[in-house]
Image: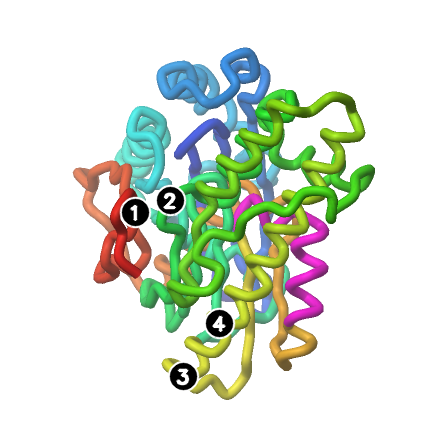
Amino acid sequence: MIKKPLILGIESSCDETAASLITENHDGKPKVLSNIISSQIDIHKEFGGVVPELAARSHIEKIDWIVKKAIDESGRKIEEIDAIASTAGPGLIVCLSVGLSFGKALASSLNKPFIAVNHLEGHALSPKINSELDYPYLLLLISGGHSQFLSVKDLGKYKRLGTTIDDALGEAFDKTAKLLGVEFPGGPQIEILAKKGDPNKYDLPKPIFNKGGCNLSFAGLKTAVLRISKDIKNEQDKFDLAASFQRTIEEILYKKTKLAFNEFEKQSNPVKKVFVVAGGVAANKNIRSMLTKLCDEEDYESIFPPKELCGDNAAMIALVGLEKYKLKQFNNLDYPAKPRWPLDESAIFLKGAGVKL
């Protein structure tokens, strides 16, 4: 019997220290043997956001234990590992450096190939862990640091169709939650608060709703929430504002996704129309439901990763490592950390005041 590759994935781009071992089953489908994630929520809660230096220190303290636990839970021995894949970017450089350095050192000591992984590519491929997924497909990546539509043509081949010109969607959720007095990370709580509110109570703005193609903008929406939050008098007002925010986001994504569908079909002419939604915000049930209905209307197959793989994790990093291992796409041990590393490196940088759409 031919030995299936065994890949160790390591993730430390922000405030999760994670390690995972992945291989393939007999028919070549990915099989996660372990997926260990250590969150730092309690460390950063009092600061209302991630403090890079504290995050890096926590990674340093935990990473050897997390990797050992991932190996132990996989039921395999460290000597059986065929390659080590570590997130090299994008992310906080002091955090990236911890996992990247650990992965390089381990690869060197075991005399195994090292694979540098783009964190965003991990999200892009994460649905492959539980779904049949062929190229090309349209990807909506929505997380705390990124919001963009991408045409995924193949491993490592991406064409950006639209992006946020200011805040990421996950950031807008977290900042809205903070304005409503919800502890960090409050973004996931917005959906819960929204269930108790009137989604039509507040008429919130939809920036670049009728221009800019499938590009996105959330800064103006966040500013409106800030202004209204100052006049909140009771809990019901808070619930109503959360519900109005959730509804507005859904309306923005509905329209922009339809535009992205058109652009994707025009550029790729796909035989099968597939829409993948990944990243932390993909765990939002209302957004999932709305986008699934839109896909039904437009004859697209909708694919989401399991909710436990929507946020940062090492299984998706190991998966990219597995794909690259089979193609022998290895990296040297001097590969640098990349705080900014777009999937489509040819795309124009669209962010900040004065952006022309």
Mark number displayed over residue 263? none
Q: Earlier in the sequence, mark 3 or mark 1?
A: 3
C-alpha gap between disc 4 and disc 3: 11 Å
Q: Earlier in the sequence, mark 4 or mark 2?
A: 2
The residue singled out by tag 1 in the image is: 351
x 33%, y 67%: residue: 159
- Left or right of 282, for residue 158: left
Residue 298 lies in the magenta stretch: no
Name the amino acid type tagged 1: Lys
C-alpha gap between disc 4 and disc 2: 19 Å
Q: Secondary structure at mark 1?
A: loop
C-alpha gap between disc 3 and disc 2: 26 Å
Q: Earlier in the sequence, mark 3 or mark 2?
A: 2
Can residue 19 be spotted in the picture? no
Mark number displayed over residue 266? 3
Name the amino acid type tagged 4: Leu
Q: Position of residue 285 (x, y in %)?
A: 71, 50
Q: Quadrant of residue 58?
A: top left
Q: In this figure, what is the number of numbered marks?
A: 4
The residue singled out by tag 4 in the image is: 259
Q: Secondary structure at mark 3?
A: helix
- Left or right of 49, for residue 202: right
x 67%, y 43%: residue: 202
Name the amino acid type tagged 3: Lys
Q: Secondary structure at mark 2?
A: loop
- Left or right of 124, for residue 355: left
C-alpha gap between disc 2 and disc 1: 5 Å
Magenta stretch: helix, strand or loop mostly: helix
x 39%, y 56%: residue: 163
Q: Earlier in the sequence, mark 4 or mark 3?
A: 4
Name the amino acid type tagged 2: Asp
Q: What's the coloring here?
A: rainbow
